[in-house]
Image (tube, rainbow, N blue to C red):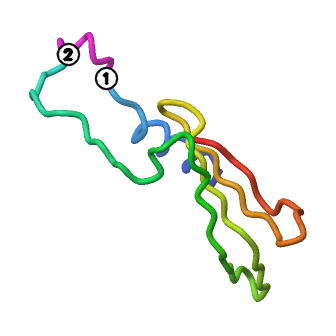
């Protein structure tokens, strides 16, 4: 019974109206897009010596940031011997 009450509460609070039903429109503010020049050269690999402390463990190695495309970057944290700890792109 407790989970039923929680589920109904979440369902009622989480529901929203459909935007087209409310006749909402997109408003152009005329603002320029924000340009961030950090890590913007696609021909350069940015390499930093880094250390991370997580859950009482210490990891040290190289943090590598590279711009791969117009809107994407790749970030990798590797040990100095070459093992990847994490590697992601956004």
**Residue 17: assigned label:** 1
- Secondary structure category for the residue under label 2: loop
- Secondary structure category for the residue under label 1: loop
Q: Position of residue 69 (x, y in %)?
A: 55, 31
Q: In which quarter of the image is residue 7?
A: top right
Gap in angstroms between the C-alphas marked 2 and 1? 8 Å
- Which of pointers 2 and 1 lies earlier in the amino acid sequence? 1
8 w.r.t. 21: above or below = below
Q: How crowded is mark 1: few (under 14 residues within 10 Å), some or many (20 or more)?
A: few
- Specify start and end residues of the magenta stretch as a single range: 17-23
Would residue 71 appear left or right of 3 to someone viewing this image?
Answer: left
Front residue (pair 77, 58): 77
Mark 2 and mark 1 in contact? Answer it, CB < 8 Å. yes
Q: Where is residue 53 in the image (x, y as percent from the top left)?
A: 69, 83
The residue that mark 2 highlights is 22
Q: Residue at x 64, y 43 (%)?
A: 89
């Amino acid at each position: 019974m407790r989970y039923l009450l929680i589920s109904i509460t979440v369902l009622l609070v989480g529901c929203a109206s459909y935007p087209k039903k409310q006749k909402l429109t997109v408003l152009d503010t005329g603002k320029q897009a924000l340009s961030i020049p950090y890590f913007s050269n696609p021909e350069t690999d940015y390499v930093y010596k880094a250390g991370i402390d997580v859950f009482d463990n210490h990891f040290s190695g190289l943090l590598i940031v590279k711009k791969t495309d117009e809107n994407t970057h790749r970030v990798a944290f590797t040990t100095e011997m070459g093992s990847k700890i994490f590697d992601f792109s956004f």
